[in-house]
Image (cartoon, grey):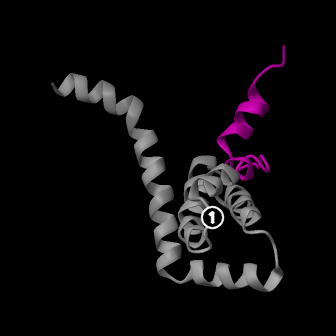
Amino acid sequence: MLKIMDITLKDVGPIVFITSAGGTLGFVLKAFGTGASLAQMVIDIGMPFILVSFVISGLLKIVQGSGAIAVTTAATLCASIASSLGMNPILILLASGPGAKFRCYVNDPYFEYIQYTPSL
């Protein structure tokens, strides 16, 4: 049983930990009032709300490097605001995904893959 768990957790563990870290970061930012500040900023600027999750995930990707955490955090922050605006939260998730591909920077693991992979 321990051998099976060891093999399984080696493959699945990073996915679970990355997803939970992104969700946790989103809830921490929401608990500190970032969500309310974000909603007020959107009202003041007049930006379409669907672009807010795109921009947040792009900025998070540049800052911390992980696209999975950027998508999860942006979706967690914006989903509750979207439902209060009458928008489907699935659209927020779909807008967060491309935002995480916004920029490949040096702290991104994909950047290292690009740098050290020989071209065909």
The quadrant where residue 109 appears? top right
Q: Position of residue 108 (x, y in %)?
A: 68, 46
Residue at 69% in and 55% down: 61
Residue 70 drawn above or below residue 9: below
In this view of the protein, which residue sits in the foreground, 6 or 115? 6
Indicate whether residue 106 is drawn in magenta.
yes
Total labels drawn: 1
Range shown magenta: 97-120
- Disc 1 on helix, strand or loop? loop
Q: Position of residue 38 (x, y in %)?
A: 66, 78
Please name whichever residue, 28 or 105, is drawn nearer the observer in this view of the structure.
28
- Residue 113 vertical position relative to residue 80 in the rendered view, above or below: above
Above/below status of 13 relative to 47: above
What residue appears at the point 58 percent right and 73 percent down from the top-left corner?
81
- Residue 65, magenta (yes or no): no
Label 1 CA crowd tier, 10 Å (few <14, some 14–19, many 20+): some
